[in-house]
Amino acid sequence: MEVDKMKNDFNSAVKEAKTVELPAIDFFKINFISFLVPLYLCVGIFFLFEYFFIRLFSIPPFLHLLILPGFLLLIYYIYLIVLIEFVAFWARYWYKKSPPQEGVFARVLDDVNSPEGKMMKYYHKRGFIIKYPMWITSKSPFPWLVNRTLRKVSHNKIGHNVIYCDGYVGLEFTDIGDNTFFYPSSALSSHAVNTIFGKITMMEIKIGINNTFYPGTIAGPNALTTDDNIIFPNTVLHKNWRGKDGKKYYQGSPGRPIEVKHLINQQKTA
């Protein structure tokens, strides 16, 4: 019994030491200010429109009601643009304090004065501040603003005509070529937590041009695809994944090259 008690006490101590204690007030302040500053600006534009434009030109009620929906949609768009710019301005300050680095680092959570602790502190802050603009732009009538958010706030390299459906984007360290399409539930993760070793990996994911990621696909840190690759459903491109020369189609965990003819035969027999 005494041995069991000692084991439980030890496990509790280890669990407590590994717990991530996020500065809730700090994060609430970041989110609250990021939400309010653009909102105040847009509310001010709305009142200027109502009390100066409408009254100054004596716009009749029926015409006012006719143009109001379009004007509110315009204000919503302005809100999103200002939000992205404001958050990007804030994030640039953190980039100067602790620039993002690629590599494998000690996951130090309890010593913010050490180099690793400082890096982890600003890593979590950058990851937190981008989540609200990412969420609201992806759910808005202007989903292409997701790419603007990723470029402006976290300095991702995203080509032309890159389309995310309802999936999981790479918040940092992604380089995505032109004409790439991500189906719903596909995911990019440029960081991986190796908890058992107390390490975290942060490395760039590089996607070639004309790529297609089907549902359920995952690309991890330092995964690299070439041009015209098609990643079929439920495929894992693990950390440091590389394809085969001359191969375009991949499936499985980990992703392995396949022949499309073989895939068609599988579907016919299913």
Image: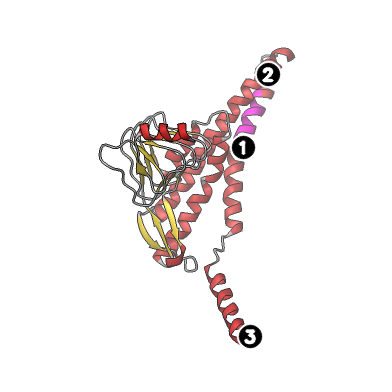
Q: Is residue 60 visible?
A: no
Three-letter code for the amino acid on which mark 1 is drawn? Leu
Along the viewing direction, whichever of 22 and 231 lies nearer the viewer: 231
Along the viewing direction, whichever of 95 and 218 lies nearer the viewer: 218
Along the viewing direction, whichever of 152 and 230 lies nearer the viewer: 230
* Residue 54, label in figure: 2
The picture quadrant where one finds residue 153 is top left
Question: Which residue shows up at 49% across the image and 47% down it?
Answer: 90
Looking at the image, residue 95 lies above or below residue 23: above
* Residue 47 within the magenta-colored segment of the rendering: yes
Position of residue 248 in the picture relative to residue 36 (left or right): left
Q: Residue furthest front?
A: 269
Three-letter code for the amino acid on which mark 2 is drawn? Ile
Position of residue 57 in the picture relative to residue 241 (left or right): right
Position of the N terminus by quadrant: bottom right
Label 1 crowd (10 A; few <14 / some 14-19 / many >=20): some
**What residue does disc 1 label?**
39
Where disc 2 sits, the SS reads: helix
Q: Position of residue 229 (x, y in %)?
A: 35, 35
Q: Which residues are magenta?
A: 40-49
Q: Position of residue 266 (x, y in %)?
A: 43, 36
Looking at the image, residue 220 lies above or below residue 137: below
Where disc 1 sits, the SS reads: helix
Q: Position of residue 34 (x, y in %)?
A: 57, 44
Position of residue 265 in the picture relative to residue 57 (left or right): left
Q: Marks 1 and 3, Cα distance to the nearest angstrom? A: 60 Å
Mark earlier in primary sequence (2, 1): 1
Mark 2 vs mark 1, foreground winner is 1
Question: Which residue shows up at 60% across the image and 52% down it?
Answer: 29
**What residue does disc 3 label?**
1
Overall secondary structure of the magenta section: helix
Question: How many numbered discs?
Answer: 3
